[in-house]
Image: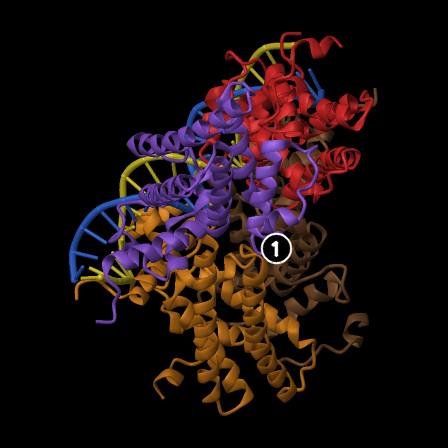
Chain colours: A red, B purple, C brown, D orange, E yellow, F blue
Amino acid sequence: MTSAPFDERLEQILATTAKVFAAKGFHPTTMRDLSRATGMSLAGLYHYIPGKEELLYLIQERCFQRVIAGAASAVSLGTSADDRLERFIRHHVAFFARHMSEMKVLSHEANSLTGKRLADINALKRRYFEMLRGLTSDVESDHAAHHDPHVAAYALFGMMNWIYNWYNPAGPLPPEALAERFAQLFMFGLTSPAPSTASHGG
Amino acid sequence: MTSAPFDERLEQILATTAKVFAAKGFHPTTMRDLSRATGMSLAGLYHYIPGKEELLYLIQERCFQRVIAGAASAVSLGTSADDRLERFIRHHVAFFARHMSEMKVLSHEANSLTGKRLADINALKRRYFEMLRGLTSDVESDHAAHHDPHVAAYALFGMMNWIYNWYNPAGPLPPEALAERFAQLFMFGLTSPAPSTASHGG
Amino acid sequence: MTSAPFDERLEQILATTAKVFAAKGFHPTTMRDLSRATGMSLAGLYHYIPGKEELLYLIQERCFQRVIAGAASAVSLGTSADDRLERFIRHHVAFFARHMSEMKVLSHEANSLTGKRLADINALKRRYFEMLRGLTSDVESDHAAHHDPHVAAYALFGMMNWIYNWYNPAGPLPPEALAERFAQLFMFGLTSPAPSTASHGG
Amino acid sequence: MTSAPFDERLEQILATTAKVFAAKGFHPTTMRDLSRATGMSLAGLYHYIPGKEELLYLIQERCFQRVIAGAASAVSLGTSADDRLERFIRHHVAFFARHMSEMKVLSHEANSLTGKRLADINALKRRYFEMLRGLTSDVESDHAAHHDPHVAAYALFGMMNWIYNWYNPAGPLPPEALAERFAQLFMFGLTSPAPSTASHGG
DNA sequence: AATGAATGAGAGTTCATTCAT
DNA sequence: CATGAATGAACTCTCATTCAT
């Protein structure tokens, strides 16, 4: 049983494709690039997917389903509004760091899909966004800080999604530290003092 | 002498092109799209620019020069580190709102250039980034909040540049209000209370 | 032993293929179309035939052998030149109506074969044509109507073979009636009166 | 003024294309074949037409418009039903002989178009068919030969359109003689005596 | 200054066919 | 006997760009 079953092979293709899309962008990437990167023939790729756009769709769809599920699970363990928001942030950043290519493709190629595929992904995006908006809204309520909560949610997403432009998960700043910094920045702002290390234990 | 001079015509072309690039993306936009949008013949366009990539370069280069100059001028009026940072934010958001297309092209097509053109733009980007990093660094110093300041700068840029994904400057939230909210969020965090309206007048 | 023997299976394939070729044309039909239509896998088809062109060849070859044999047998019962010609016409039209797909493929895809296969089919075509030419020639001799007899034969074939463009055997005009009308038209022309119904009985 | 204007060039392309389509068939013909046959680059062709199917459409549409106009004009000179029908036949055959390629493409590629283009051509085809059906109907009335007149019209079209399968206009039988023979066959049948040669001179 | 015409290179996709299992 | 997987070759069409006028 040397030949991998269909799904496994498709998974390989999607993983490789995500890397190439992340590196070159969806439009500049040619099917021939993907053929080369996957080691398959051009026609062979079409055995697994009906076209280039479907590749992008599959990458985005799977990735979104996973972040959404992961976030839901992470948030469910929270004990307070603040705690839940922080868990959301930690999860998002950690997931992004672990799936850089896919998440970059999700963030950067948001409008490279068309028609029904675009609509599908946008529906997922809305779900994910609403999740975060609920959390920021709750935090603001708790702190009697009443603002338009969708602005805060978008601000946070911007902060977090922008990282594909600069962050290297293998660099000196580990994802957990980045997540914590983001959480602190977003909750308490730039002017808040660095939390004492002890505060974690107490 | 009904025909506009060269530079004026080029300006028109760049403005129109920025809109089309913003709407469709750089790669999906064809020279024929630009020919149609500008009302010029395809060959006519080539009298003003040597190629499609140069259009992108010119849009990005001019736009960057202007934000940088504008930011420098805005910041120079600041009376404290906090004030200077807030002025930077206000300026960036206001500029973005006034030049949505160009700024989206700047943010989204950061890697659509190649070679020397890319290097040129990246140099400008670095200058602009360093400007903000200096400001966040100063604010942190003032507040004895010592963190890696480039993370904060990137976070703020992410927050602000992400707006091309959701913000409508002509909608209910005017750019000034958005800028203020961003400034407050970034400086004091989500948990800080809404500033009293009186603070505006006083 | 539920699986049909090789020849039976081949027959099914040819019958299905003829329908698809008739409906879509030889060139636009893909092997995948045939795989779908026959319910077999793509590779499975290749167990029965060496390629797409062979399918067309087999359909044409068998069909031609049958019309030729049928025509010979029908004509052999004739009692006069006129009678023999009429029998040929009746047989051709009836056969066409009973094997619409195959006959359309024969008529319409006459030049979709290449090389030896084309030559083979053309030889059969010539044989069939010569048969009819002999008959029209005899009729003309009998009526002292001397013309180039191959023109008449081609005219009649045109009249009869064209029916795949318009005739529906399941419609109001049954094949026998069509054949009779063609026979009358061809023998006596448009201006001849309709034969009295009585003439059939007497 | 060495370069031919757009329309003239398009005309050349259509003429050449008709020949190639007639020789190889629409589907087997590749755009590269047409590029070679016209002496233009592949991309150059697309300056004149939006795609391969449009070439087929234009060839069929123009050809149909011309036969229809020519037939109408020819028929209008007729002095009796018989005369008008004969004129129609003569015109059709002569036109076919003069425009063999286009007429073969019209006859043989009747269903290679799709969608609106197909509908358009089918509308023209109906018009032309109705023209002939009116004529055969009138002739039958005059001769008190009452049959379903559309069968006769289809028979005649079959007779005439089939010629692309065998007739060579440059061969021993000139188009006028072929037309006359068809007219005689169709009006009076195979059994009618050859018209006296004198009738030609007098 | 401006353009219609033209093109080389390459894009995504399809196809008939093969082969290991 | 049957098939999923795979592929080389080729297809239609598009693109950024050039050039004669």
Please identify the quarter of the rendering in which residue A186 is found.
top right
The residue under the point 40% across, 51% down is B17
Q: How many numbered callouts?
A: 1
Q: Nearer the viewer, residue D15 or A58?
A: A58
- Where is the C terminus of chain D found, in terms of image quarters? bottom left
Q: Tell me: A104 left or right of B124.
A: right
Near mark 1 (Cα within 10 A), the count class, few <14, some 14-19 or many ≥20, is few
Which image quarter is the N terminus of chain D in? Answer: bottom left
The outermost residue toward the front is: B202
**Foreground residue among B78 and B54:** B78
- The quadrant where residue C44 appears: top right
Q: Which residue is mark 1?
A: B171
Placement of A24 over or under E7, stated as above or below: above
Counting from the top left corner in percent of width and height, residue C51 is at: 55, 30
Query: Seen from this angle, which residue lies furthest bottom?
Result: D79
Horizontally, is B196 left or right of D77 in the view? right
Q: Residue at x 58, y 27 (%)?
A: A191
Label 1, secondary structure: give it.
loop
